[in-house]
Image (spheres, rainbow, N blue to C red):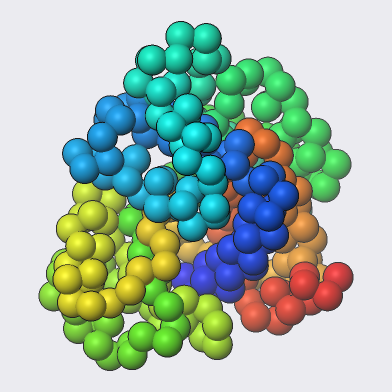
Amino acid sequence: MSGHSHWSTIRRKKEANDAKRGAVFTKIAREITIAAREGGGDPESNIRLRMVLEKARAAGMPKDNIERAIKRGTGEDKDAAALIETFYEGYGPNGVAMMIDVVTDNRNRTVAAIRHLLTRHGGSLAESGAVAWQFERKGLINVPASVDFDTLFEAAVEAGADDVIAGEGEDDHEVYTEPSDLHAVSEALKAAGIPISQMDLVMMPKNEMSLSTGDAVQVLKLIEKLEDLDDVRRVFSNLEVTKEAVSAFETA
């Protein structure tokens, strides 16, 4: 699972750059709307909304944008287009399995854009269920690498975490939980004085696929292009992301 951390570091750098242009706000606004629609507009009682709001503030999203997104979700904005939250399953180059996390107001537009990119880069869309069995839903808490790992490990295990992975270099430590335990574990870590840089629900591959550096870079380029689509929130794959692949990707 350690490769997930390498790619997460790249994604955060990109999101930080996108935030400067406001490019990331559309995606976060949709996440806020979905969270408010499902659990209400009060972050105190809506854990998912609270997580997204933390992401919005970290990205520097204006307060007015946040409030509008919440109103769309709670139904106060009657003119807002209905949003659909779903996954598309597919294959990248060399048969790498992909779960494409989508929030859209137009399925036809989204699936056409995803199919185009997959086909153009040697992949294809898959039937529902063809890929999903290779992944499992997990809670993920990112903790800065500056935190002492032994201290984090002890606190996380005591709080009920499933696994704790040490970060390498500037990569965060990663704490994995059952989805239902994500909030409780994160609150326990905060109570122990451990800072949290991000937390989310993710799709983790049960087994990773190892490719040559060149082939892995090809897959990472496709993932980047998919994640650049406005309707795509995140792409999860079973690619083993090595430091060599990340380094080659960054200099490609």
Name the spot of residue 204 as percent of width and height, x first: 44, 57
93 in relation to 241, above or below:
above
- Residue 209 visible in the shown view: no
Q: Is residue 198 left or right of residue 226?
A: left
Figure disc tally:
0
In terms of image quadrants, where is residue 11? Answer: bottom right
Name the spot of residue 186 as percent of width and height, x first: 25, 63
Q: Is residue 110 left or right of residue 161?
A: right
Name the spot of residue 44 as percent of width and height, x first: 21, 42
Residue visible at 79% across and 76% down?
Answer: 248
Q: Is residue 65 left or right of residue 94?
A: left
Residue visible at 32% across and 46% down?
Answer: 50
Name of the residue lying farthest toward the left: 158
Image quarter of the C terminus: bottom right
41 in relation to 135, above or below:
above
Residue visible at 40% across and 46% down?
Answer: 53
